[in-house]
Image: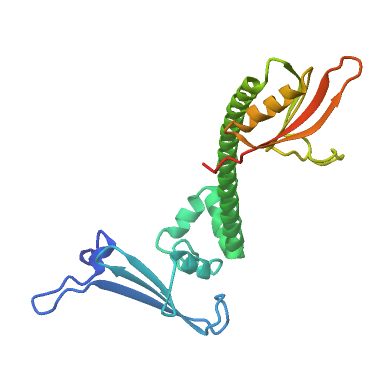
């Protein structure tokens, strides 16, 4: 009988003879009486088929419907039927069971008790959860990298903006305050402050009102500026200086 055994699964495919052509696949089917509902499927007769193709591909079928090997294994879980089941015990299997480690014997008892299915599903859920957590960690790391790059660009952008603003200030004008992205509303407890990143507020003083107009003109000529608004100006009696407030609306940068 050893001469009928093959070294690999492809050996069971008919190789042909002088009178008959070789076949491209081989298949084997097992038919089970499921009238007692032992198998978790709504058929009184269940046929499980495996096809092996000469290309090396394998197909599994339950009642002629294509399925995965996983589906076949789950169908027979906790039934005692299977490669490691206890329904069919080969020669020397009992001695092997008795001499096995306690962990191996426990697997057999779990199979008999009908809890292998739940243990397997638990393990699959744990693996899926682990993959999800790893994926989330990678996404969080990516977010941190992008956030760092964005902050770096924002810092560089702010430095360039401040440099250009400084070049626009006339010698006769003294700036007292500069606010980037001012608050759009009063900060409320428990809520993040709302700011407008497209606005710059400038405050300062000068003895000559014409210098304020010159300042506004210089700002308006800059490439970063969309609009310049003089929102306030009044003369201080004590110093005779003119205090002003200017709002600069920045051009929105295109994405990328």
Furthest-right residue in this view = 238
In the image, residue 104 sits, relative to residue 20, either above or below, namely above
Vertical arrangement, residue 42 with respect to residue 70, above or below: below
Q: Is residue 5 above or below residue 154?
A: below
Please identify the quarter of the rendering in which residue 41 is found: bottom right
Residue placed most toward the observer, 244 or 6:
244
Q: Using residue 73 as the reference point, say whether residue 136 is left or right of it.
A: right
Snapshot quadrant of residue 19: bottom left
Give the residue at x 41% y 58%. Answer: 92
Rendering coords of residue 130 (x, y %): 58, 47
The residue at 45%/54% (across/down) is: 96
Quarter the N terminus occupies: bottom left
User: Which residue is at a point 57% across and 82% down the rendered structure image?
Assistant: 36
Q: Kindly tell me whether residue 1 is visible in this rendering.
A: no
Picture coordinates of residue 16, whole percent (x, y) = 15, 73
Front residue of this view, candidates 49 and 111 = 49
Query: Where in the figure is residue 56, as x and y percent of width and height?
Result: 28, 62
């Amino acid at each position: 009988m050893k001469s009928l055994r093959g070294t690999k699964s492809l050996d069971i495919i008919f190789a042909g003879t002088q009178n008959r052509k070789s076949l491209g696949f081989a298949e084997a089917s097992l038919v089970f009486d499921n009238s007692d509902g032992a198998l978790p499927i709504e058929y009184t007769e269940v046929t499980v088929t495996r096809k092996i193709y000469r290309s090396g591909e394998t197909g599994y079928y339950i009642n002629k419907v294509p399925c995965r090997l996983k589906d076949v294994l789950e169908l027979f879980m906790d039934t005692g039927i299977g490669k490691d089941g206890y329904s069919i015990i080969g020669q020397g299997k009992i001695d092997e069971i008795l001499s096995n480690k306690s962990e191996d014997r426990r697997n057999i008892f779990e199979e008999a008790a009908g809890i292998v299915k739940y243990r397997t599903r638990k393990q699959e859920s744990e693996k899926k959860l682990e993959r999800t957590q790893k994926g989330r960690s990678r996404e969080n790391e990516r977010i941190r990298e992008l956030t760092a790059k964005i902050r770096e660009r924002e810092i560089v952008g702010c430095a360039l903006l401040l440099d250009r603003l400084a070049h626009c200030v006339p010698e006769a004008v003294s700036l007292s305050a500069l606010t980037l992205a001012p608050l759009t509303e009063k900060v409320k407890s428990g809520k993040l402050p709302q700011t407008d990143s497209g606005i710059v507020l400038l405050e300062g003083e000068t003895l000559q009102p014409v210098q304020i107009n010159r300042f506004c003109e210089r700002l308006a000529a800059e490439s970063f500026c969309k609009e310049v608004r003089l929102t306030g100006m009044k003369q201080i009696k004590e110093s005779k200086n003119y205090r002003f407030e200017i709002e600069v609306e920045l051009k929105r940068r295109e994405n990328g």
